[in-house]
Image: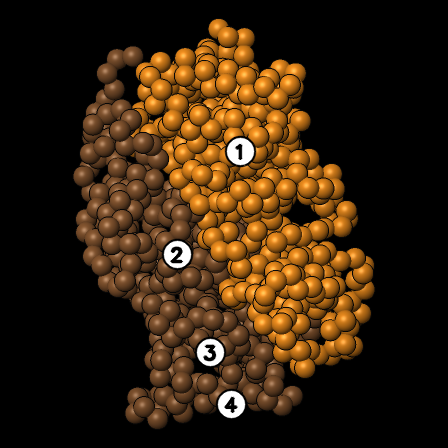
Chain colours: A orange, B brown
Amino acid sequence: MTDPAPLSLSGQRLAAVYELTCPDDQAETRARDICLEQTVEFPEDLIPRQEIRDQIVGRIASIETFGPDRHRAVIEYPIEAAGEEFPQLINLLFGNISIKPGVRLVRFELPPSMLNSYRGPRFGQSGLRRRLGARPGPLVCTAIKPMGLGPEELADLTYRLALGGIDLIKDDHGLADQPFCRFAPRVQLCSAAVQRANSQTGGNCVYVPNVTGPTQLILPRAHLAKQAGAGGLLFLPGLAGLDTMRWLADQDDLCLPILAHPAFQGPYTMRGDEGISHGALYGQLNRLAGADAVIFPNFGGRFSFTPEQCRDLVDGCTCAMGHLPTVFPVPAGGMRVERVPELYEFYGDDCILLVGGDLHRHGSDLTENCRRLIEMVKMVRMGTGLDV
Amino acid sequence: MTDPAPLSLSGQRLAAVYELTCPDDQAETRARDICLEQTVEFPEDLIPRQEIRDQIVGRIASIETFGPDRHRAVIEYPIEAAGEEFPQLINLLFGNISIKPGVRLVRFELPPSMLNSYRGPRFGQSGLRRRLGARPGPLVCTAIKPMGLGPEELADLTYRLALGGIDLIKDDHGLADQPFCRFAPRVQLCSAAVQRANSQTGGNCVYVPNVTGPTQLILPRAHLAKQAGAGGLLFLPGLAGLDTMRWLADQDDLCLPILAHPAFQGPYTMRGDEGISHGALYGQLNRLAGADAVIFPNFGGRFSFTPEQCRDLVDGCTCAMGHLPTVFPVPAGGMRVERVPELYEFYGDDCILLVGGDLHRHGSDLTENCRRLIEMVKMVRMGTGLDV
């Protein structure tokens, strides 16, 4: 073989922040291990060329200790190691080390040259507000369920919810294309139900069907939804892949807001010393993948997120990421109508409140229950002295 | 609205086995919670029709206690809740409850009517053996690396490894389409290198490029690989989605063996009381998704799997699953040549041993190092009295 061509990298790097759980005297070794594992995956002493050691292998920018056996390491990787591809970026940030204990990815920062290869959310907070008619304050979302109802029943529910002034009505995340509730008739009937309600109320309610499905059916379903008049798309990146959501969001002929749902992603954020932080996974990665709003289980509901984790998630939805707009956090998961004041205090104006089953608990007039919920959101907001 | 049509379900159910970590007096409540969360996701008392309660909601088949605060619950779901779709099956098995602590999916069993809608692995253990020339005993695999080498250098490595009699030569899982090593020239040169070596040795070595990438590029890359003469495809379902692997495996015009790599899947199996068992995730779900061989970090390497977890993974690769063939476990992750006897004792004949960087440690003659590794595999096998 002739001598290989030099690497000629740009010198630009992306930065990943990891929290390491290990004794103090091992922190640097662990960080160094990440530098190798995530790039060359090769014994350091056997790396065949010096420029690979210098330019490809990750570089420790800093290590600080922030608690007993807890360390924060910033590691910089050459942007070329991720190429221009989202899956390989995820791989570089947390592929193999996801299998090693005591390492948590908490944030990452991409240089503008890299961010520019991501379209990101098409709407974001401000775009979605414009599309929904721009009532100030928190938006309100609900889900049609339970599984087992047929398309006509769900459309009837949708109509009554839309009449009550809900902003977004999404499929329950378990609605796919089951024999008792096929995708096509459900989406057609529910879209029509929302349009009928909007024509009566003058509102801008949107129906958001779940287009997650077998890979080859995702785009056909999304196009069917668009043609039927759906106003957004629900997607489950944990089941279908983050890059598959990016692929969906990048379709110029769809151009619909995307709500991301966290099903099957729980293990990433379950333990504070491993996996990925709520902000990096549900916030930053979902934004790169084009989500305009991020559904997650709020603290104090049926799940186990803490207020601190929810705050971190909001930070990931709104932190600076170049040209990528901020996106909506959508606290959900067993939310009760009575919790609106507490939710407003915590999330403020820029969130979408998702109330599901609890809307059905307050008497049989669903439309009236929706009106009361929205009235409560307005009143709570007024109580703060803000203009409603 | 007129009265809704009755559900008319088949009555067939799939079974999921969960391990619950909770006090004894909460086990039944927790199991019941799973029955609801994974189907109707709705307060039980508000479910609008009795037949939904009876037919859609999961059903507890059994609960047994197997340790302090440890319980094994078998829950049966109607097959119609998953429809005929893999993502919704995963959702049903472990979507929302992945976000709840103390629940681990350890196994699942699908009735034949459901399994029949999955093609599964095209080759499996016996098909892959036939394709590779059927030397008895463990097959041998290695990876070309480190990241930073160009296509010509990797092709030169590939040639020398193939000359040494390695059965499968795969891309390192971090090789994507980086500017310093583009997918197309790498795959063309490495495929040609293997063919050149095979023509000299009379062997059947195959090159297995990594076709994971942006969703819209996966099939084009796989077709390019096939045209170039690659003998298998490496895929990372943790990055691209399990169903995306299923989609790839289902392409009749590709028809190449698929090796699954576990990058980004670590959090699912990190904790013994949460997530998914090694057997269910890396074995059962990968088989449904069409993988013919499953790479995983062996015990005692750079990662943290235990022998028991590796045994469970092998069980998931080989347990009865209707028409789905058994697939190869591929222990990897810092394997050293000297460990062959121990690996053989543990995995026996039906595995693929993946030795990566360590092949480079034993002197500069890579071809000779491969020959010695394969000789060692044969000798260890002979030592057991088996026919080699």
Which of the labelled discs sits on residue B300, or is there none?
A: 3
Q: Chain of mark 2?
A: B
Q: Are marks 2 and 4 in contact (CB under 8 Å)?
A: no
Residue at (28%, 59%) from the top-left corner?
A: B70
Disc 3: host chain: B
Which residue is tagged 4? B372
Quadrant in which residue A249 is drawn: top right
CA distance for labels 3 and 2: 22 Å
Looking at the rendered structure, the secondary structure element under dot 4 is helix
The residue sitting at the top extreme is A200
Q: Is residue A344 left or right of residue B47?
A: right
Nearer-N-terminus badge (3/2): 2
For label 3, the SS is: loop
Q: Position of residue B160 (x, y in %)?
A: 60, 81
Give neighbour class at mark 1: few <14, some 14-19, many 20+ (Cα, 10 Å).
Answer: many
The residue where tag 1 is placed is A330
In space, the residues marked 3 and 1 are separated at their CA atoms by 43 Å
Q: Quadrant of the N terminus of chain A?
A: bottom right
Q: Please tell me whether residue B89 is drawn above or below residue A272 in the rendered image.
A: above
How many angstroms separate mark 2 from mark 4 (CA)? Answer: 42 Å
The percent coordinates of residue A160 (x first, y second) are: 40, 14
